[in-house]
Image: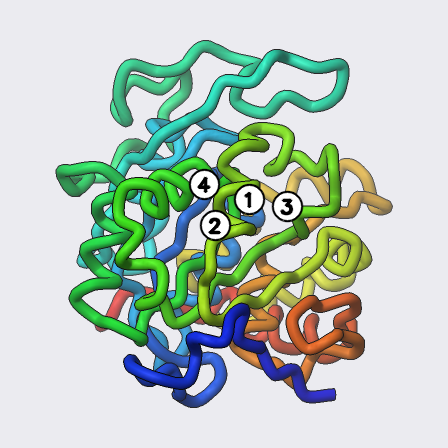
Amino acid sequence: MVLSTVCATASCSPGVPLDGPPGTGKIIIDADMGELNDDAQAMFLLAAAEGVEVLGVTTVGGNTWPEEGTAYALRQLELIGRADIPVVTGESNTPEPRDDYDGALDRPRPASHRALATPPHGGYATTRPAAGSASDFIADQVRRHPGEVTVFALGPATNLARAVREHPDMVPLVREVVHLGADTEGEEFNRWFDPEASRVVFEAPFRRELVVTLEAAQRLTLDGRTYERVVAGEETPVRRLFKELQGPLFAGDPGHRAFVWDAVAAAVFLRPEIVSDSDGRTVLGVDPDRFWDLYVTRIGSARPSS
């Protein structure tokens, strides 16, 4: 099944062209980045993809505080030799704690990206975050490259919503927005963390959108057998990171499984043919064999240039 993302409004036809080969183009990754979490895995997949130019990573509060996300993004980009990609520290909403998982709210917010309670695995990056706000960065890049930028909204929508509010002129210039999760999924973590921002973003008249549902992504979990496929072969920085961070979990529990939510959204963008069920805009199912073949082949391939 071939997925064709669709225009959200009738304004697609005139003005700025939106066409381009699937899985290519300029992108911004807006994410609540962690250490080898699903956001990081999505970043690795996208940064290693041919035909994809990562304009920058913006960090948002959610699973991690923006300062934590910045530290992890800088370190992991440096690890794969992509310190050229700017990382911009974004904003965070602070919802009332709930009985379920609270993400960043479970710990104090650090004063800066170099003041984490525990430094990133392997130490802090030598590179620094880019100056300015995440929302301004998103708007500026979209204006510089009208009709060319895909925004990956992988965390709470705080940064993107602020860009929509403060720079409404950039909305029709965005090539596409890739969402993980839908606005109808209620208590889904990203929506709960900043529900007003989610409303603003889903109601904004972006001309083209791709929505990968949480339900579709949750059907795909990394198990021990697939982990062994990931770490097999020539050692790369990402494979080594998998061994060091994921290896003990699988060694301690052969039945261990890990969600890869945002990596699914990245894979669907890169290879639309892996989609098994969609309504043209919303991905309802992903072929597991095709997804894992892509994931295993690509996830460990990012490395510093020799």
Give the image location of residue 155, x and y in percent: 51, 42
Residue 40: which disc?
2
Q: Earlier in the sequence, mark 1 or mark 3?
A: 1
Give the image location of residue 298, x and y in percent: 52, 73
Q: Is residue 61 left or right of residue 6?
A: left
- Badge 1 density bin: few <14, some 14–19, many ≥20, Cα 10 Å: some
Give the image location of residue 73, x and y in percent: 35, 44
Q: Earlier in the sequence, mark 3 or mark 4?
A: 4
The residue nearer to you, when weighing 205 against 110, is 205
Asked if the residue under mark 3 is in contact with the one under mark 1, i.e. CB atoms within 8 Å, the reply is no
Height in image: 126 above or below 229? above
Element type where label 2 sits in the image: helix
Q: Earlier in the sequence, mark 4 or mark 2?
A: 4
Give the image location of residue 272, x and y in percent: 61, 81
The residue nearer to you, when weighing 277 against 142, is 142
Q: Is residue 245 left or right of residue 15?
A: right
Height in image: 54 above or below 102? below
- Badge 4 density bin: few <14, some 14–19, many ≥20, Cα 10 Å: many
Q: Amino acid at mark 3?
A: Gly
Q: Amino acid at mark 1?
A: Asn
The residue drawn where x is 45% and y is 45% is 31
Asked if the residue under mark 2 is in contact with the one under mark 4, i.e. CB atoms within 8 Å, the reply is yes
Question: Residue 126: in sight, yes or no?
Answer: no
- Badge 3 density bin: few <14, some 14–19, many ≥20, Cα 10 Å: some
Question: Residue 220: in sight, yes or no?
Answer: yes
Asked if the residue under mark 2 is in contact with the one under mark 3, i.e. CB atoms within 8 Å, the reply is no
Residue tagged 1? 37
Residue tagged 4? 33
